[in-house]
Amino acid sequence: MKIALVGYGKTGQMVGKTIDEAAGLECVGIVSAKHTSNLFAIKEKPDVIIDFSHPANLDMISEYAERNPVALVLGTTGYSPQQIELIEELAKKNPVVSTANFSLGITILQQVLQQITPVLRERFDIELIEKHHRRKLDAPSGTAKLLLNSLEKGKAYEKRYGREGMRKRGEEIGIHSIRGGTIAGEHTVIFAGDDEILEMTHRADSNRIFAVGAVLAAQFAAGQEPGLYSMNDVLFHKL
């Protein structure tokens, strides 16, 4: 299977290394400041494009996908509502796996939260804390939003981004973002009840976990019909 990479930062480099170590996979081109300027300059046509870059590259990816049969694995975060609509349009003609976090652990955590939250929500308050390195620009993280979506299945909450002043707690989820140092990524969901606390934490010790998940997603997407898929589809499609 032939794969093209868009973006060659730390995660993109790890994806490239993971591809090189996997049997039957080949990286046929890289779009970055130090490599090819755009997808159309790549000589061999890829079966899959893996993107860990910047939302500004979505137009180029979209144009290429409209002209060539290719599966897309999109790991970039910070898309605008209009760009999300564009991704949904792309999925009508191409298989697209789009997620803010390719970690297998986060995917499992989403499943767990969807199962336990309906049982706990009436007697437990819910808080979400996410931590990342000082260079991360967006807050809350895309992963935090994924987890919020799992927590809100079947019930909408008011979302409180940090707290200040005097105010009684309502039917809300508190979301707290921490930025500092070289934290690769940490997400904690807290269920706080009377006399007991349940905490679930996922820590990313390196970006290798995202690269492994992205390559799994590429292998999955290459054999799918057009549609918009998530990591839940990648991991659980055979169950």
Image (spheres, rainbow, N blue to C red):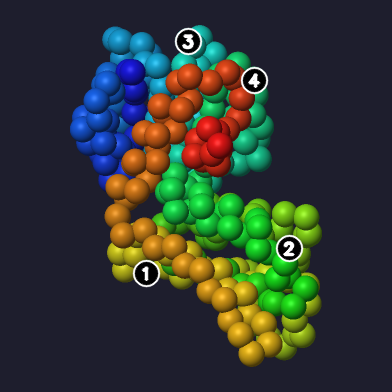
Instruction: Residue at 41%, 57% (x, y): give it.
Output: 136
- What whole-number distance in Å separates the C-alpha atoms at marks 1 and 2? 33 Å
| SS of the residue under disc 1 | loop
The amino acid on which the numbered mark 4 sits, given as a three-letter code, is: Lys
On residue 92, the disc is 4
Marks 1 and 4, the one that precedes in the sequence: 4
Marks 4 and 3, the one that precedes in the sequence: 3
Marks 3 and 2, the one that precedes in the sequence: 3
The amino acid on which the numbered mark 2 sits, given as a three-letter code, is: Pro
| SS of the residue under disc 3 | loop
Q: Could you tell whether 109 is left or right of 212 in the image?
A: right
The amino acid on which the numbered mark 3 sits, given as a three-letter code, is: Asn
Marks 1 and 2, the one that precedes in the sequence: 2
Residue 184 percent location from the top left of the image: 35, 59
How packed mark 2 is, by other alpha carbons closer than 10 Å (few <14, some 14-19, many 20 or more), is some
Q: Which residue is mark 2?
A: 118
Please indicate, yes or no, whether residue 36 appears anywhere in the rendered image.
no
- What whole-number distance in Å separates the C-alpha atoms at marks 1 and 4? 40 Å
Residue 69 percent location from the top left of the image: 49, 11
Instruction: Residue at 61%, 25% (x, y): give it.
Output: 227
Name the residue nearer the viewer: 91 or 32.
91
Image vertical order of residue 163 relative to residue 173, above or below:
below
| SS of the residue under disc 2 | helix
Residue 3 percent location from the top left of the image: 34, 22
Q: Which residue is mark 1?
A: 180
How packed mark 1 is, by other alpha carbons closer than 10 Å (few <14, some 14-19, many 20 or more), is few
Q: Which residue is mark 3?
A: 68
Where is residue 213, by image quadrant? top left
- What whole-number distance in Å separates the C-alpha atoms at marks 3 and 1? 41 Å
Q: Nearer the viewer, mark 1 or mark 4?
A: 4
Instruction: Residue at 45%, 39% (x, y): give it.
Output: 75
Q: Could you tell whether 106 is left or right of 13 in the image?
A: right
